[in-house]
């Protein structure tokens, strides 16, 4: 069983072709710019959301917070008031449950992408789900990860996964610690391993002013990807305050002109491997 | 006489539009073709509608000339020889288009233009080829300013087809309407080019060629909105039934199925046959048309069309449930369509020789005056379920329609960077029974109204009262107001 934050039946931006995306609950990094901090933790049933829900969609049952989808107005007040960076709305589903949804829509899909939170924290679920998908459909299996995974687990996942998308927060270790609270050594090692296996579909970096947007950082990260292999695409994403909590919640969207400058620096190095 | 003065002094109509309106006025000064009182009553009550075809039809509604034959033999009547190069081929087509009759006065079918022109590619340089095709398309848009003017390309990959798709994306003109026939042999990158064009300008239609070949044979064309008809033939008339109104006069579902619907469809077919009779026997169309004389059309390829629309509201009235969200509603919807199909097919279709003496069944896409009633078998705009569910449900209904049915799926702009993904969805739709479909993005300059396209900017001009070349802009502007066209669900991420 796994904690599922949300399933999107059709996405065009989470890997190649038409894909179903499964966003899983729980994360092991604490990125300052995280757009979905409600995916970090599991619910501790404090009830703050129940107090604030005006539609009665949240209530207590046997001391636990329960959620009635039909009454929900999707106002997201529950997420905003949660003191624990969680949400009362995630569901517990089995690999079979998620597989059934993908199978039902298989005619319209190229594949399935697991994302988060950090989906690899629930790697046993992924192994089971991807195995079902591989055995019964032609759908491809992708993982969107921050790369902060134990190497043994990564090796197991590689056996059932067709492609990985890595969020590389920064190449410079200090910048990485400033942004996420963790060093990136393990992440880079994993990324390089996936790259060598021919499975590194895409690397993404969110540009955050003053953290990872120096010319030096952009150049280095682009060169790093350029030298990794000849196939991985790189995507630069401008910071947006939408959904962000904490220190950076009042930061403005990343400046357009500045973004263009960063984009052009990277474009010179990566050419067509830099995505629009 | 007041009507004539009204037409003459209408500042929203230009000269040609006034001339067309005057000719309709003259035609309608005759009594309606000879039909029963009951059929007449259904028309007066808005239960049956003949889509402004006029009281005394003197030409078929849809004519699909065999342009291939025209290229092989030339035309005595037009004094056109068999074309020997691309210049002559383009010229020959632009000439004959002005001689193809229809209800609007503009040809509703321009031919499988890439297949027709491809053999002449070697007669000109690359640059000339592109220039000629550009002038060809601009000429069609300016001289045949009616969004029901419809060109076909595919299913074979062609240089001409690719150039046309690229040109269309840059020209951004509403005319011609365009369909790409997609078969299992059509290369993916040809379809992807059409997807790219579609996400910018809302055309082409994607046609499930393999499926339509099973119904109509290889020799079919897509005309007007999305009507699938035999080449060298066409349809005498299209008379439609408003299922919402039929539901309103039924006591309950059983009464609808057993008593009211059969009675209405009986009258619909009566009207259809009388109109066909009038065209053939009274107006003697086939005796006066050079297209018939030169065998570019043949009565043996013709049919008539029985249309239905308003299924969504019909089901809502009869069951209190909504198509797309309740399984029972959907079962009911399919039963209604199956029943209507069978009722139409029970009748003899006069002169419907192209369909073995049967009338074609059509999901009519609605017109400007339709208020609070959905096109064909489509789910009400704004109430569509999740896209894959919508496609599956629509796919189950589309199989009943042998002369045209379609749905429109609106994507958000992320689709533009993922043509592969859209291709998968289109192929999935075909696999699930979809015969004809179109896609668009919510920010497109061209808006697909029901089956045809209009420019957003032209609608604004129309609202200000400026005269415009295209009569379909007026239809489009009124449809947007009356039918909630812009409320269609956007398929986002």
Image: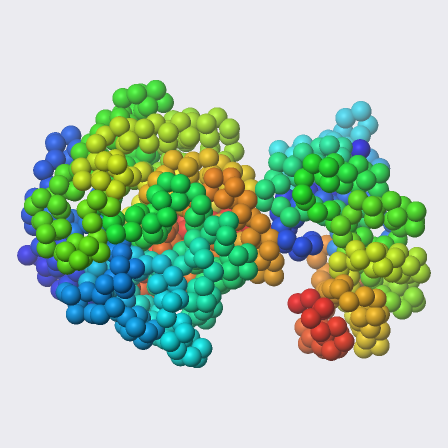
At which x and y percent is residue A109?
Answer: 62, 46
State whether residue B402 appears in this view: yes
Quadrant location of the C terminus of chain A? bottom right
**Vertical placement of residue B484 versus A195, above or below:** above
Q: Quadrant of residue B310?
A: top left
At which x and y percent is residue A192?
Answer: 87, 60
State whether residue A258 appears in this view: no
Q: How many marks?
A: 0
> Image point 19% across, 54% down: which residue?
B295
Q: Nearer the viewer, residue B210 or A38?
A: B210
Left or right: where A192 falls relative to B86: right
Q: Nearer the viewer, residue A47 or A176?
A: A176
**Vertical placement of residue A46 versus B70, above or below:** above
**Vertical placement of residue B201 versus A90, above or below:** below
Left or right: where B424 falls relative to B255: right
Left or right: where A113 falls relative to B217: right
> Image point 18% across, 37% down: which residue?
B350
Q: Nearer the viewer, residue B469 or B121?
A: B121
Q: How is the image coloured?
A: rainbow
> Image point 89% across, 46% down: which residue?
A153
At which x and y percent is residue B231?
Answer: 29, 51
> Image point 16% across, 70% down: which residue?
B79
At which x and y percent is residue A71?
Answer: 62, 34
Q: Quadrant of residue B174?
A: bottom left
Q: Nearer the viewer, residue B125 or A82?
A: B125
Quadrant location of the N terminus of chain A? top right
């Amino acid at each position: 069983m796994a904690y599922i934050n949300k399933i999107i039946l059709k996405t065009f931006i989470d890997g190649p072709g038409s894909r179903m995306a499964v966003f899983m609950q729980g994360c092991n990094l604490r990125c300052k710019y995280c757009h979905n901090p409600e995916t970090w933790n599991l619910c501790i049933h404090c009830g703050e959301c129940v107090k604030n829900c005006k539609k009665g969609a949240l209530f207590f049952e046997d001391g636990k917070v329960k959620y009635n989808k039909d009454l929900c107005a999707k106002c997201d007040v529950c997420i905003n008031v949660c003191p624990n960076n969680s949400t009362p709305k995630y569901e517990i589903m089995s690999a079979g449950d998620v597989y059934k949804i993908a199978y039902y829509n298989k005619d319209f899909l190229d594949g399935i992408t697991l994302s988060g939170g950090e989906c690899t924290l629930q790697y046993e679920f992924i192994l089971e789900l991807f195995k079902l998908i591989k055995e019964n459909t032609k759908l491809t299996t992708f993982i969107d990860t921050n790369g902060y995974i134990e190497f043994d687990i990564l090796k197991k996942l590689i056996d059932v996964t067709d492609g990985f998308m890595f969020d590389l927060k920064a190449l410079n270790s200090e910048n990485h610690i400033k942004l996420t609270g963790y060093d990136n050594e393990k992440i880079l090692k994993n990324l390089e391993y996936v790259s060598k296996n021919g499975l590194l579909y895409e690397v993404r970096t969110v540009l955050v002013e003053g953290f990872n947007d120096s010319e030096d950082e952009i150049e280095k990260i682009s060169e790093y990807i350029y030298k990794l292999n000849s196939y991985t695409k790189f995507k630069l994403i401008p910071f947006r305050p939408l959904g962000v909590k904490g220190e950076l919640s009042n930061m403005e969207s990343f400046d357009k002109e500045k973004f263009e400058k960063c984009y052009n620096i990277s474009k010179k190095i990566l050419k067509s491997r830099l995505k629009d | 006489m007041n009507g004539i003065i009204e037409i003459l002094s209408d500042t929203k109509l230009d000269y040609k539009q006034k001339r067309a309106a005057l000719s309709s006025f003259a035609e309608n000064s005759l009594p309606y073709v000879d039909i029963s009182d009951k059929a007449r009553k259904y028309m007066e009550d808005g239960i049956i509608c003949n889509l402004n075809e006029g009281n005394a039809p003197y030409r078929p509604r849809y004519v699909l000339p065999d342009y291939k034959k025209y290229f092989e033999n030339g035309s005595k009547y037009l004094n056109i020889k068999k074309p020997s190069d691309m210049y002559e081929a383009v010229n020959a087509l632009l000439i004959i288009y002005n001689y193809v009759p229809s209800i609007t006065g503009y040809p509703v079918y321009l031919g499988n233009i890439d297949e027709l022109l491809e053999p002449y590619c070697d007669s000109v340089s690359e640059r000339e080829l592109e220039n000629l095709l550009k002038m060809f398309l601009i000429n069609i848009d300016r001289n045949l300013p009616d969004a029901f003017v419809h060109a076909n390309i595919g299913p074979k990959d062609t240089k001409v087809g690719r150039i046309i798709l690229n040109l269309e994306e840059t020209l951004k003109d509403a005319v011609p309407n365009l369909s790409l026939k997609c078969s299992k042999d059509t290369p993916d990158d040809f379809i992807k080019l059409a997807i790219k064009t579609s996400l910018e300008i809302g055309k082409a239609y994607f046609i499930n060629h393999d499926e339509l070949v099973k119904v109509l044979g290889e020799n079919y064309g897509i005309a007007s909105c999305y009507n699938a008809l035999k080449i060298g033939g066409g349809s005498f008339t299209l008379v439609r039934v408003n299922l919402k109104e039929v539901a309103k006069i039924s006591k309950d579902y059983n009464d609808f199925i057993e008593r009211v619907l059969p009675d209405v469809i009986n009258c619909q077919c009566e009207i259809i046959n009388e109109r066909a009779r009038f065209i053939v026997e009274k107006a003697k169309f086939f005796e006066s048309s050079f297209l018939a004389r030169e065998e570019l059309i043949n009565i043996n390829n013709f049919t008539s069309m029985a249309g239905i629309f308003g299924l969504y509201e019909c089901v809502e009235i009869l069951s209190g449930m909504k198509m797309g969200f309740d399984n029972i509603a959907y079962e009911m919807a399919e039963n209604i369509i199956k029943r209507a199909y069978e009722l139409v097919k029970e009748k003899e279709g006069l002169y419907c020789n192209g369909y073995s003496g049967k009338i074609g069944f059509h999901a009519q896409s609605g017109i400007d005056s339709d208020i609070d009633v959905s096109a064909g078998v489509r789910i009400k705009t704004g109430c569509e379920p999740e896209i894959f569910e919508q496609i599956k449900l629509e796919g189950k209904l589309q199989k009943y329609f042998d002369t045209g049915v379609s749905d429109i799926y609106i994507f958000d702009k992320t689709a533009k960077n993922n043509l592969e993904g859209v291709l998968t969805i289109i192929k999935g739709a075909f696999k699930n029974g979809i015969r004809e479909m179109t896609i668009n993005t919510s920010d497109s300059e061209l808006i697909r109204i029901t089956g045809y396209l209009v420019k957003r900017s032209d609608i604004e001009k129309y609202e200000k009262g400026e005269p415009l070349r295209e009569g379909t802009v007026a239809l489009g502007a009124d449809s947007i107001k009356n039918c909630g066209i812009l409320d269609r669900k956007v398929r986002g991420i």
